[in-house]
Amino acid sequence: MAEFIKIYPDKPSEAAIAKVVKVLQNGGLVIYPTDTVYGLGCDITNSRALEKIAKIKGVKLEKANFSFICHDLSNLSDYVRQIDTSTFKILKRALPGPYTFILPGNNNLPKEFKKKTTVGIRVPDNNIVLEIVRQLGNPIVSTSIRDEDDVIEYTTDPELIFEKWQNLVDMVIDGGYGDNVGSTIIDLSEHEPIVVREGKGDIDIL
């Protein structure tokens, strides 16, 4: 059964964050708050954990559209090909914030994603998940726990999230009520920005 842990977003406890990081390093799955809906994630470097998430979501890992949560833009060159100045300016304006940016992937993508030409990058405006990624030292792979058929409370109330997911994951973080609107997805992998999905993030940043 999963552990349920309370972390305050204003000033996340170092000890609590370290506990989450340990679970991720051991190949565990964690549900955590973002600036949009609660997310399900694991350490990007752990193949077995990635397989588990794909299985839960009912998708083949190599075909899964998971996004990478980074602490800031300094991680970008690890997984993203060289981007031009105008693209970088959009990222700088929008992040941290409720956006997923699709960018051209490079040859350093984890082996499970080698066939992909693009990667979704998230830098959420949420101290809890940013601290987790910072302490972990590399991005986490992330997918939303929201299901089209879900009762809204089951994806926004941490206690109900725990009730539903406790036998599928290793830890659920209570970081307060979540949102029920996903991130705005913007494709920056081609010459012109394309809004793939309008969500919480304002598209005026383009």
Image: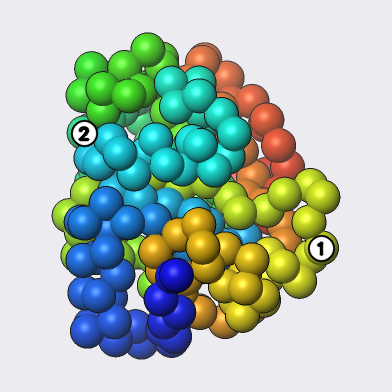
| SS for callout 2 | helix
Task: Name the kind of residue labelled 1 in the image.
Answer: Val
Tell me the tag on residue 124.
none
Q: Measure how far apart labels 1 and 2 are at the Cα level.
A: 38 Å
The residue drawn where x is 62% and y is 73% is 163
Which mark, by number, is residue 151? 1
Q: Is residue 59 left or right of residue 199?
A: left
Q: Residue at x 53, y 67 (%)?
A: 166
Q: Is residue 40 above or below residue 171?
A: above
- Evaluate if marks 1 and 2 touch, with contact meaning CB atoms under 8 Å apart: no
Q: Is residue 185 left or right of residue 130?
A: right
- Reading the chain from its start, which is encountered first: label 1 or label 2? 2
In the image, residue 125 above or below residue 174: above
Q: Residue at x 21, y 24 (%)?
A: 108
Q: Position of residue 167 (x, y in %)?
A: 51, 63
> Which residue occupies the foreground of this view, 87 or 23?
23
The amino acid type of the residue labelled 2 equals Asp
Q: Residues within 10 Å of mark 2 (few under 14, many from 20)?
A: some
Q: Inspect this view and state whether residue 128 appears.
A: yes
Q: Position of residue 86 (x, y in %)?
A: 43, 30
Q: How is the image coloured?
A: rainbow
* Quarter containing the N terminus: bottom left
Residue matched to label 2 = 78
Q: Is residue 95 visible?
A: no
Number of callouts: 2
| Percent coordinates x, y for residue 195 in the rendering | 67, 31
- Comparing 19 with 9, the one in front is 19
Q: Nearer the viewer, residue 189 or 128?
A: 128
Closest to the observer, 160 or 76? 160
Q: Quadrant of residue 57?
A: top right
Quarter in which the C terminus is drawn = top right
- Label 1, secondary structure: give it: loop
